[in-house]
Amino acid sequence: MTIYQELLGEDFQRLHPKLQDRYALPMGKPFYGVGTMLKVRAGSPWLKPFLTLSARWQFLFPESGRDVPFTIKNTCRSLPSGEAEIYWERTFYFEKISRNFNAYMTMDPKRKVVKDYLGEPHLFYSDLKMSVTPEGRMQIRSGSQRFLVGKREIPIPRLLEGVVAVEEGYDDVREVFTIQVEIRNRMVGRVMAYEGEFKAASL
């Protein structure tokens, strides 16, 4: 049972069957997808220095574009502590450069949230709350966030948080997974957003 199955409980069965297969993620058997981001949008131009710096940690990036080739790989693995971790690898192939957006997800069973450790090495994490829409799509919303300083966790002030909204579905007619992601900040607006589609593929 993956962290997503455990977190959603009976609601996991309300996901589209293709999404159930995608998020089941047997240990050591990655999901790999290939597709196209129809739109990738960065935030305001004055955010470019911050986004460029973030790219060093394989997190945010400053590029925008249309019809950007894309791959995604999700791998479930066991940590030394015995808890399960999902490693997310997302790569955007722009014309002149490739950008990564990576993360490590574990579950906090007491608070019933996913802890999303962003970037490599990760400097902070965000709580994620997951739910299933009436149409069977996976919906993800961010919660509180914390900086990581050694073994210390420092709460990020609400005004500085990135507000994340994700919705992933499956189009039966076109036989593709669909994805929409938006990251905003309460003060500066959009930080990054992308939307597109992908299909499961063999590694």
Image: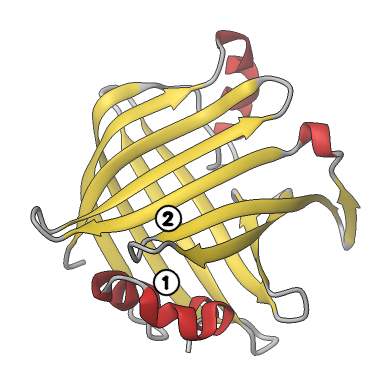
Label 2 secondary element: strand
Which residue appears at 74% of the width and 22% of the height?
A: 187
Which residue appears at 58% of the width and 27% of the height?
A: 191
Residue 129 is drawn in which quadrant? bottom right
Identify the residue under disc 1: 75
Which residue appears at 24% of the width and 71% of the height?
A: 18
Which residue is more in the foreground, 65 or 19?
19
Which residue is more in the foreground, 132 or 52?
132
Whether residue 177 is visible to the viewer of this picture, yes or no, is yes
Question: Within 10 angstroms of label 2, few (less than 14), some, or many (20 or more) residues?
Answer: some
> In 3D space, how far apart are the residues under numbered discs 2 and 1 (Cα atoms)?
9 Å
The percent position of residue 19, horizontal first and vertical second, equals 31, 69
Identify the residue under disc 2: 89
Direction front: furthest residue? 134
Which residue is more in the foreground, 60 or 196?
196
Which residue appears at 77% of the width and 50% of the height?
A: 145
Direction left: furthest residue? 173
